[in-house]
Image (cartoon, rainbow, N blue to C red):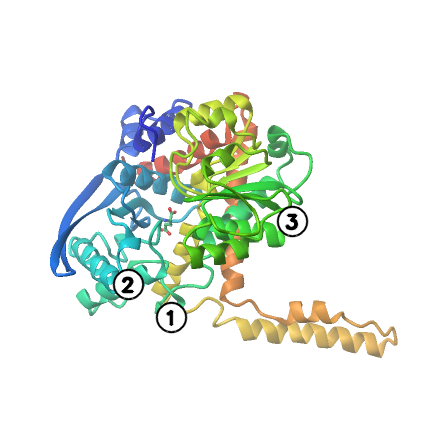
Amino acid sequence: MTPANEPSFRDSVDIMFNRAVALMDLPPGLEEKIRVCNATYTVRFGVRLRGQIQTFTGYRSVHSEHMEPVKGGIRFSLGVNQDEVEALAALMTYKCALVEAPFGGSKGGLCVDPRAYDEHELELITRRFAYELIKRDMINPAQNVPAPDMGTGEREMSWIADQYKRMNTTDINGVACVTGKPTHAGGIQGRTEATGRGVQYALHAFFRDKDGMKKAGFESGLDGKRVVVQGLGNVGYHAAKFLSEEDGCKIVAIIERDGALYDENGLDVEAVRDWIAKHDGVATYPNAKHEPDGAKLLEADCDILIPAALEGVIHLDNAKGVKARLVIEAANGPVTAGADEILRNKGVVIIPDMYANAGGVTVSYFEWVKNLSHIRFGRMQRRQEETRHQLVVDELERLSADSGIGWELSPNFKEKYLRGAGELELVRSGLDDTMQTAYQSMANVWHGRDDNIDLRTASYLVAIEKVAASYRAKGL
Ligand code: GLU
């Protein structure tokens, strides 16, 4: 939650937008058109639970329809409100533009504590919310395609897809009305890990950028970097897991709702995740030190800070204390506009949310395309690719034998080369390519100007230019 003495989340996003747009030469009318949120629908509905009717409030906000469908998750949390949903919808517009996912921006939210209900009750609530949105075309494969966000996941997305199909029995593309579904219900492999995987790919891109590294004061790559992760939900968990298991990072602290765990030698991410699942928190975890005031660890000595939970967690009161040289915003809006200025002045580099957590919507895009094409990626090519590779291997082995050289291909090479790409490999490769291309477009602006702008402003400049071009093409 954004602290009371600071601009609201929505205002914070606008402040950042305005900072970038001031450097552009857009007609004032167009600038305003891009900034404003097109529409926000509020719905109140009742569900009979435990013998009485309970009323819930939900929102679906559409920020920009310069491309359709519009896209963005649905959040279940007691903190949901119109300002938050509108801020998140605006970020979706810029995020999709930056990574070239052909969508406008939208976001939804339901004021509910999902932990207070059992599975059956949650299904009733979710289906009823979906019903309200579907009947107004606010869930529709051609117009508005939700996805998971905080408090929702595969399970909720499959209820939503099923609800849409019940109400639109002849829509052959019905399953594309929502993404983030389980694979047995039209989902795509790699969607659950996608946002965390995207954070990892974003860091790979950053640590390939010598100028960017210099601006953050890094001389060496990711290996051995000390990382603090705030929030071990889906995004934080996958990011921490991949960075520690594959890139040699040390996760020195994990901040959760009931305090933080810390260990200079690096925490076992998998073990902490299992502990949280069984004990509903980290406080009793036996293999690390525990700090009840978890937020203190945002100011811990580390190289990289990954806020992966709520908005507004780095604010005017704690920004000065942040010691990381690199902050990567795995969550949406974790740094307030005021904190952003403090960090910038300290020389901290921030990899902004609109880029850092775009892995989720990128793989959602792949899922939507898969649903519309009604065929799994790789199904037509995989065996053909393997057969052609086998031809090359056979020929190399024949040449080696016939010439008497006696070279042998290593089994490791053969195994890797012969295996055609399945859906997961294709998804990861598409995601990696997306993250690299988007990084390059931001970095060109970041390093290519002489007014010393920050990476967030660069990302806004790229995104706004794309949205503007799309409006211009429509004659606006
Ligand atoms: N909720 C995610 C986000 O904030 C994913 C949205 C999507 O996949 O459409 O980006």
The image position of residue 378, as x and y in percent, is 49, 68
Q: Which is more N-terminal, label 3 or label 1?
A: 1
Residue named by callout 2: 119
Residue named by callout 1: 184
Residue named by callout 3: 248
The local secondary structure at tag 2 comes to helix
Q: Which is more N-terminal, label 2 or label 1?
A: 2
Indicate the amino acid at tag 2. Glu
Residue at the image point whose x is 35% and y is 43% from the top: 92
Q: Nearer the viewer, residue 442 or 237?
A: 237
Residue at the image point whose x is 69% and y is 38% from the top: 220
Mark 1 or 3: in front is 3
| Quarter of the N terminus within the rendering | top left
The image position of residue 227, as x and y in percent, is 57, 41
- Distance, label 1 to label 3, CA atoms, is 34 Å
Indicate the amino acid at tag 3. Gly
